[in-house]
Image (spheres, helix red, strand yellow):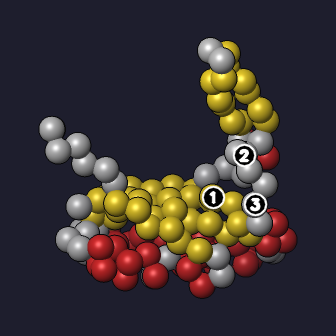
Amino acid sequence: MEYLALIHADEGAWERLSDEERDAAYEQYAEFAGAAEAAGVLVGGDELGPTSSATTVRIRDGRRLVTDGPYAEVKESLGGFFILNCSTYDDALDWAARIPAAGHGAVEVRPVHVDPEE
């Protein structure tokens, strides 16, 4: 079963890191991704652009409304994701706990919906 691990963190804290600190953080993510790939768990994942690059689209009364920025103002914004293929929910939670952001932000885990008709 596939699980989506959504990485939430304080975007401002990331922006305040030095280049060396960011490089160290990227190395931690690379180590996690390498371990997950070696274990056959990693399906995919990526870092997202900053919330300042986000655009939100809604349809209201048949009209498209476009708003610059993310959907909501939050302290911890969505910064990236991994898709993990695990045999159990507990295994997905164990892998999510190894994602570096779990130590300073939050990692939300959700099962990827499977259509029973397919």
68 w.r.t. 10: above or below: above
Judging by the rendered image, the residue that carries numbered circle 3 is 74
Q: Which residue is mark 2?
A: 70
Q: Between residue 1 and residue 39, name the one nearer to us.
A: 1
Q: Secondary structure at mark 1?
A: strand
Name the residue: 69% across, 36% down. 56
Residue 25 appears in the rendering? yes
Circle 3 crowding by C-alpha within 10 Å: few under 14, some 14–19, many from 20: few
Callouts 2 and 1 close, C-beta under 8 Å:
yes
Quadrant for residue 63, please give it.
top right
**How many other residues sit within 10 Å of disc 1, few (<14), some (14-19) or many (≥20)?**
many
Closest to the observer, 98 or 78:
78
* Secondary structure found at label 2: loop
Which residue ends up furthest to the top in the rendered image?
Answer: 62
Mark 3–mark 2 CB contact (< 8 Å): yes
Q: x and y percent of residue 30 in the render?
A: 49, 71
